[in-house]
Image (cartoon, grey):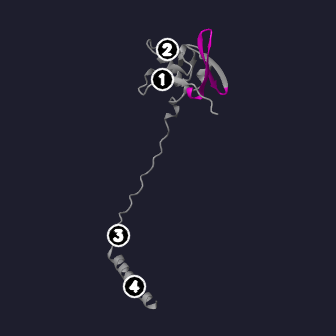
Amino acid sequence: MALSLTACGGEQGELSQWMEQQKREVKPSVQPLSPPKKFNPQAYGALAGVEPFSTQKLSVALKQEARQPNSLLAAEINRRKEPLEAYPLDSMAMVGSVIKAGRPYALLRVDNLLYQVKQGDYLGQNYGKIAKISETDVSLREIVQDAAGEWTERTSALQLQEKAR
């Protein structure tokens, strides 16, 4: 056992000598850091400008859009809003349908309240107008802004929700 420890000790000495030799031979080449640039503070000048996300700016833009003669949005802006237009579509659930006086009605649950809607009613936050009501879904057309800023129509639907047991 003592013999094996002395053998390791000899290798340890050679290793230490080699490390010392490498330290002497290798000269590090570190480039000095450049001095930091002087910081010149600037006053924030856009504070007096128009806030890009203000509701006033948005309402002005919507009114300008409504004044254009062939705008999809023109008729929608000038009409009176209905109560279900305050809620997004994903917060609504179709829970049933009924037929009264030969007309189909859908039953929608919003915030744990039940609403009865018919074809032509408006719902959702994208000027959604109900186009068709069937036993299993409510089809509607919405007016949304595309990536280019143009107003276009799209179709959406609310499906009948089965109650989980």
Using the image, tell me which numbered label, if any, was put on residue 28. 3
Q: Which amino acid type corresponds to the residue marked 3 in the rendered image?
A: Pro
Q: Earlier in the sequence, mark 4 or mark 2?
A: 4
Q: Would residue 54 be counted in the magenta stretch? A: no
In the rendered view, would you say 96 is above or below 19? above
Q: Amino acid at mark 1?
A: Val
Q: Secondary structure at mark 4?
A: helix
Image quadrant containing the C terminus:
top right
Residue drawn where x is 42% and y is 28% of the image: 147
Compute the Cα span from label 3 to label 2.
74 Å
Q: Which residue is mark 2?
A: 74
What is the CA distance from the residue labelled 4 to the residue labelled 3?
A: 25 Å
Place of residue 107 in the rendered image (x, y in percent of width and height, measured from the top left): 62, 20
Instruction: Determine which residue is flagged by label 4.
Output: 13
Q: Is residue 143 above or below residue 4?
A: above
Q: Name the residue tied to disc 1.
A: 144
Q: CA distance from mark 1 to mark 2?
A: 13 Å
Q: Are marks 1 and 2 in contact (CB under 8 Å)?
A: no
Distance of label 4 from label 2 (alpha carbons) = 91 Å
Q: Residue 135 location, x and y as percent? A: 57, 19
**Mark 4: amino acid:** Gly
